Image (cartoon, coloured by chain):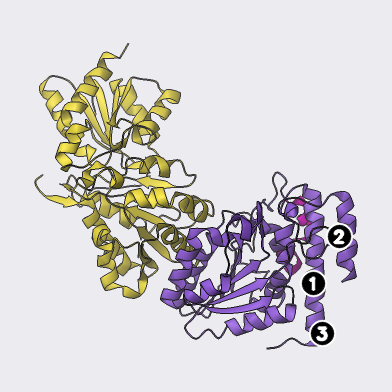
Amino acid sequence: MSLTEEKFIELNRMACRIRTDIVEMLNQAGSGHTGGSLSAADIITALYFHKLRHNPADPNWAGRDRFILSKGHAAPVLYAALARSGYFPVGELKTLRQVGSRLQGHPDSKKLPGVEVSTGSLGQGLSMACGVALSARLDKMDTRVYALLGDGELQEGQVWEAVMLAAHYGLENLTAIVDNNGLQIDGACSEVMCVDPISDKFRAFGWDVIDIDGHDIAAIVDALDRADTGRGRQTAIVAKTIKGKGCSLFEGKVEYHGTPPSDEELKVALEEIGKV
Amino acid sequence: MSTKIATREAYGKALLELGKKNDKVVALDADLSGSTKTKVFGKEFPDRFFNVGIAEQNLIGTAAGLALGGKVPFASTFAVFATGRAWEQIRQSVCYPDLNVKVVASHAGITVGEDGGSHQSVEDIALMRVLPGMTVIVPADATETHKAVMAMDKHVGPAYIRVGREKVAVLFDDDYNFRIGRAHVFSKGKDVTFIACGVMVEVALKAAEELAAEGISAGVINMATIKPLDADAVIDAAKESGAIVTAEEHSVIGGLGGAVSELLGEEFPVPVKRVGMKDVFGSSGKPADLMKKYGLTSDDLKKAAKKAIAAKT
C-alpha cells in the first residue's frame, strides 16, 4: 500500500521527533552513538509507525512482527521509537546509560519491554532473525521478521553464515535492512575493510535486493511492502544513508560514531532538526 | 557392569524421545549430525531439524532465534567448536538474553582419541561454567545422559551438556534419580573422597575399591552437575573425610576441580588434589593410552588420594 500524503507527513514528523529524542538523550547521557542512531531514524520510523504489526500494551503478543536491532549500538533510535510507540514513558529516555536504568548502553531484552532480544556484539542479529523466521514457519504463522544491520557490521563472518542459511531455507518472511552509512568507528568502511559491493554480495548469495535512499520515507515504505511478496526468497533492503543525518555538525563525520552532542551542539541540532 | 554405551548414543536416543513428547523441541547441527547423533532426531523429524553447515557461530545464533520463537532448540557439534568457536555467541545470543537454548556437545575430552589435540576439548567446562545463568552437566554414563536430556523438558534457560565419543560403562539403572544440581553419592569415605564427573566416575569407583583393599576408606561422589554445584555434598564430604580428590577429563583449571577448590577454599578448607589435564593440550592415540599418558587412570587417582591424605594436618 502506498502512503497517503497525510501519513507521509506524519511519518516525517515522527522521524524528526525521534531524531530530537536521540540527540537529547545522548546529550543527557554524556556518551553513546550519535551517528549510527541518526542514520537509521527514518528506517526505524517507517518500521515502528507504519510497517510492524505490534502492540505496545502487550509486548509479547504472539501475532507481532519481530524486529531485531543487530547494530545494537544504535540503541537510542530504538528506545526513542519504543517510547514514542508507548512501550514505556518518554520521560524515561533521559535515564539512558545511567546506573539502574532499563535503557542500557546496548539493548537488553531482559530489562526493557519491546526489545525483542539483546544485541550489541555485532554480527549476531541476523542469525537470531533466521531462527525466529524458521520458528514462525514451523508454527505456520505469517510473522514477518526484520533485522537492521550496519554496513561495517557486514565485516563479521557470522553475517554471511546467516545470509547463506536464509537463502538455503528460502526465508521469505525475513527482511534484512542494511544501514549503509559508509562509516565505522575507525573510518570509512571502504578504507577500514571494504564491504562493497553490498547489493551484489547479497544477490550472489541468492537474496532479492532492493536499493533505496534510506532517508526517503516513501521509498523505505515501498521497499518494506515489496519485501512482503518474497515468493520463496528473503529480501535485503540496502538503504543508502548519511551517518549523523539531521544535523550538519554530525553528517558524514566519523568522529560522531561514538560521541554524544555537547550542550552547544545540541542547540544547533535541535534547531536544524526542528526546521525540517 | 559389562554393558558399554557412548553417552552421545544415549543423547541421540533421548533427543528423539523428547522430540516425540514435546513438539517444541527442535535440533540443530553443524555438519556433524552423524557423530553427535542428532541425525536420529533429524530422520524422524526432518522439519524440526536444521543442519546449518560448518558454521558454529550461526548454529548458536539460529538456535537463539528459534528459542525466541518459543522452540526448545538443542544445538550440537563437537565440544571444542561449540564452546570455543561459538563461545561469544553462547554468551551474547543465549546467556545474556537468558534464552532457552540447550547446547549438547559431543567428542569432549581426550577420549576423542586419534583425531588429536585440535579436536579434544579440555577447556569446555571452564568456558561454560564462567557464563552467568548457564547450567553445566557432565553425565557419567548413558542412563544419566538420558535423564539429563529428559530433564531439559522442565528446565527453562541455557544449559550445556557434555557427552563423549567412546563407549563407557553403564553405572546407573533406570530407577536412578537424576536431579540437576544434585550430586550422587556412591559411597562415603573416612579418609578421602573422590569427586568425579563424566568418564572419570568409573575410574574413581575402581580407585576407591582398590584403596579399600589397602585399608583406605575412599568415598565416591558423581558430580554430574558442575553448575550449579551441589555445595552441600562437597562440604559434607570435606567434613567427613577431610581430604578431596577431584577427577575430570578436562583441564585442572576452571572445571570441576576449579569449582570444588573455589568452594572449599572459601567454606571449608581441606587438602584438595585435582586430577585432570595439567594445563596441556591432548594428542593423538588410543583413548586408553591417552588416559595413561595424561595421568587419568585409577593408579593416578590412588596416588592423588594418598597425597591428599598425607597433607591433612
**Residue at horizontal 26 percent and vertical 55 percent from the top:** B146
For disc 1, the neighbor class at 10 Å (few under 14, some 14 to 19, many from 20) is some
Q: What residue span does the magenta drawing correspond to?
A: A81-96
Q: Residues within 10 Å of mark 2 (few under 14, many from 20)?
A: many
Please name the residue that numbered disc 3 is placed on. Answer: A6
Disc 1 to disc 2: CB gap under 8 Å: no
Q: Quadrant of the C terminus of chain A?
A: bottom right
Q: CA distance from mark 1 to mark 3?
A: 12 Å
Which quadrant of the structure image shows residue A3? Answer: bottom right
Q: Residue furthest front?
A: A191
Residue A112 falls inside the magenta stretch: no
> Chain B rendered in what hue?
yellow
Label drawn at residue A269: 2
Image vertical order of residue B270 relative to residue A2, above or below: above
Specify which label sits upstream in the sequence, 1 or 2: 1
- The local secondary structure at tag 3 comes to helix
Q: Amino acid at mark 3?
A: Glu
For residue B228, say whether it is visible.
no
Q: Nearer the viewer, residue A50 or B238?
A: A50
Q: Which chain gets the purple colouring?
A: A
The chief SS type of the magenta part is helix
Residue under pointer 1: A14
Left or right: A181 in relation to B3: right
Secondary structure state at the residue bearing disc 2: helix
